Image (spheres, grey):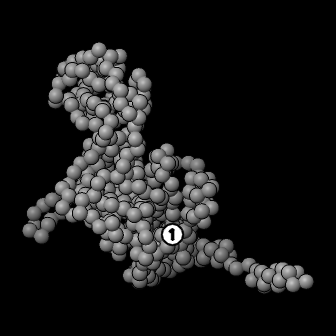
Amino acid sequence: MTSDPIEGDGPAFGVPPFLPPRVIVALYLPAAAYNVTSVDPAFFAAAPDGPMKVTAMRFDIMLGTTRAGRIDPVSLPARQPRTPPAALGTDPADPGGGGGQKPSTTTAPFDCTGDIPGGKYRLAMDFVRWERHPRMRRPVLIAAFEGWNDAGDAASSAVRFLVERWEARPFATLDPEEFYDFTVSRPQVRLDDASLRRIEWPANQFSAAAVPGTGRDVIFLVGVEPQLRWRTFCAGIVDIVASLGTELAVTLGALLTDVPHTRPPRITGTTATTGLARELGMEASSYEGPTGIVGALHDALSKSAVASASLWATVPHYVHQVPSPKATRALVERVALLLESTVDTGDLGLAAGDYEREVSERVDADPEISAYVHDLEQAYDLEHRPVPGVDNLAAEAERFLRDQRDK
């Protein structure tokens, strides 16, 4: 493969050898940009950030080779924050609006290592697929991913339940091509109503809805943990939610642990900062160890100044292969409480009852497992046992303070 030269009169810059052919390299500088004076039109691409006069160049690169060009400085105003895309035909009270707007594709930039004179370059990957641009009111992101962070399918099922109950409408997806090893996350063959075969690829779907009884909207993201390019993947998500003015991002997760299936699941809420933890009534995370895409996303959100928190439900490790509607229900109710709204979880309650009954039948059939679960129940009850005399002690304290005030 050969590459056409790019010529100019400015300082030279080098292009990393690892960039795939479809990568668009865009130069972003705080107060100045560099413009290519001579370039084949086939390589030209418009910059995604609006008013700035920035030239993006598309390169075809062979593995182990680089291309160098010379670029000229041009002056331009300082970069302004990205603003939400304009919505067409949208009722502000209906985040599912935007009817009549044609589907579009925008690029989601990803900062990568490598300095050039006066700034650094960013990779703009063509993987964010906008169906429409909803207008949002103080939105909160609720996200969950199938995979390592989704024991018992509890987290992803919770988001899907809320999507259905609050009638959220899709507005964007992430193209899976860049992020999945399809020998691991295999696409599925389905037959439609006309018995025609179609392939369903791993999906990451954004949708929007109004939160009932509040003055805000919610962005839902249901996806699948990718195998590849986590930082680029997270950058695309951050680009979407930041462009919509997201005030808070909340991820849902579920983990396997030694809890009995006959007791309510524990819900743990964590944040990256103690200030936000106090505000939301959660704990600052002290976890150290391996992480999944949820941890990577929180890191990307914190670097983009988007506040974030995480809610985790416990799932019995001895029934990890069975979906857990009990944990799903607990997450749904905690999300509704966080958003100061309500949601009918009656269907989940019935499913949770069936789940507990069926698991109990299997446990009772094995004396060893039955004894183990009995020990877990005793430990759970001991941990959650009310402290004797606390209510009386509080009443006595109130009485004492009242008497002191009356003296």
Residue neighbourhood size for the residue with mark 1, other residues' Cα within 10 Å, grouped as few (<14), some (14–19), many (≥20): few
Residue at the image position 31 percent from the left and 20 percent from the top: 72
Find residue 308 and report its horizontal and vertical position in percent. 50, 56
Can residue 217 be seen here? The reply is: yes
At 40% from the left and 51% from the top, the residue drawn is 242
Residue type at mark 1: give it: Leu
Q: What residue does disc 1 label? A: 338
User: Considering only vertical position in the picture, is 226 above or below 316?
Assistant: above
Work out whether residue 260 or residue 175 is closer to the camera in this orientation and state it: 175
- Residue 218 % position (x, y): 39, 65
Please tell me which residue lies in front, 366 or 91: 91
101 w.r.t. 83: above or below: below
Residue 223 location (% of width, % of height)? 35, 57
Picture coordinates of residue 379, whole percent (x, y)? 65, 73
Residue drawn at (83%, 83%) of the image: 402
In the rendered image, which quarter is residue 14 located in?
top left
The answer to whether residue 114 is visible is no
Above/below status of 179 relative to 132: above
Q: Is residue 222 left or right of residue 267?
A: left
The residue tagged with tag 1: helix, strand or loop?
Answer: helix
